[in-house]
Image (cartoon, grey):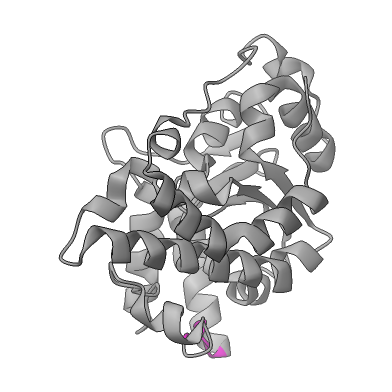
């Protein structure tokens, strides 16, 4: 099986990227109409049948804030369970041999070793999309929702993002079959970014050339409107890892 897994922190632009790539004739997206997050729900269902699941971080991210991911363990399936997983996965996500399966699932961002174990005999490529931490922390005003005080929720989200990026540098970053892109580059220069992905997959770029917009809006309103003191508290938490991302994956001016 050939497949491209699109992974990333929530609201990093995975859906946007898939919406562009799905128009390529060499890629096959198994997505049901009127059923959002089909890939996520299907893989979750398969895992449940094998007695495991995606990780539940809760709205407060308390465990990750305190201990990172050390108390979270990726599924350890027996050989027979791995065969069962593959059989169910192939049944749900079957595609022609001439096509590359296109699959998006943010939860798999945290299941790096699991993917490599289950699909070790397959031609699997991965694209990780990273987005500025301050955009992630205030995304969709999630920090204003839930049962805990908003400022505490905001800082918890900042620490959770930081810990997630640290995990990225210990996993995906070291994978030669993984391409990392920046959401900011995808927004400012979609053509350059999509061309880079096509080269990585060894598929022609031309079929997508006419469908790519010249630019995509990168909304920063929520961050720009955030109180200065709250901005400062967020940056204290994320600045070091944000600088590392900016150094390793700089934003390219068009």
In the rendered image, is residue 242 in sight? yes
Instruction: Give the residue at the far left of this rendering.
Output: 147
In the displayed orientation, state which residue is furthest to the front: 229
Assign the magenta stretch its main secondary structure: loop
Residue 249 picture location, percent across and down: 78, 47
Q: Is residue 24 visible?
A: no
The residue nearer to you, when weighing 162 against 27, is 162
Compared to 157, does 22 lie above or below? above
Give the residues drawn in magenta, as a range: 72-78
* Total marks placed: 0
Going by the image, does 170 lie left or right of 81? right
Which corner quadrant holds the N terminus? Answer: bottom right
At x 37%, y 76%, the residue is: 53
- Name the residue located 58 percent from the left edge and 26 percent from the top edge: 20
Q: Is residue 25 left or right of residue 193?
A: left
Quarter of the image with the C terminus is top right
Residue drawn at the location 71% of the way across and 22% of the way down: 189
- Pinpoint residue 61: horizontal percent, then vertical percent: 36, 73
- As rendered, which of 79 and 234 lies closer to the eye? 234
Q: What x and y, as percent, mark residue 148?
A: 20, 67
Which residue is most to the top?
210
Which residue lies at the image location 39% right of the left edge and 72% below the top edge? 54
Q: Is residue 195 above or below residue 207?
A: below
Q: Residue 73 magenta-drawn?
A: yes
Residue 136 in the magenta stretch? The answer is no
Quadrant of res 241: bottom right
Residue 251, image quadrant:
top right
């Amino acid at each position: 099986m050939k497949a491209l897994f699109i992974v990333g922190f929530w609201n990093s632009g995975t859906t946007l990227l898939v919406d562009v790539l799905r128009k390529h004739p060499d890629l096959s997206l198994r997505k049901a109409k009127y059923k959002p997050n089909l890939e996520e729900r299907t893989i979750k269902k398969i895992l449940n049948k094998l007695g495991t699941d995606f990780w539940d971080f809760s709205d407060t991210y308390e465990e990750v804030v305190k201990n990172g991911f050390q108390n979270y363990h990726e599924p350890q399936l027996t050989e027979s369970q791995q065969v069962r997983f593959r059989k169910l996965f192939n049944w749900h996500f079957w595609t022609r041999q001439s096509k590359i399966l296109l699959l998006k699932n943010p939860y798999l961002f945290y299941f790096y070793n699991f993917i490599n174990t289950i699909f070790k005999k397959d031609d699997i490529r991965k694209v990780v999309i990273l987005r500025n931490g301050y955009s992630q922390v205030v995304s969709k005003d999630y920090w204003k929702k839930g049962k805990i005080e908003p400022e505490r929720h905001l800082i918890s989200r900042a620490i959770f993002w930081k810990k997630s990026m640290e995990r990225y540098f210990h996993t995906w970053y070291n994978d030669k079959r993984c391409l990392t892109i920046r959401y900011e580059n995808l927004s400012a220069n979609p053509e350059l970014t999509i061309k880079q992905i096509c080269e990585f997959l060894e598929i022609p770029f031309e079929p997508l050339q006419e469908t790519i917009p010249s630019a995509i809006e990168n909304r920063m309103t929520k961050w720009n409107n955030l109180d200065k003191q709250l901005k400062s508290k967020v940056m204290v938490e994320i600045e070091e890892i944000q600088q590392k991302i900016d150094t390793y994956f700089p934003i390219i001016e068009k």
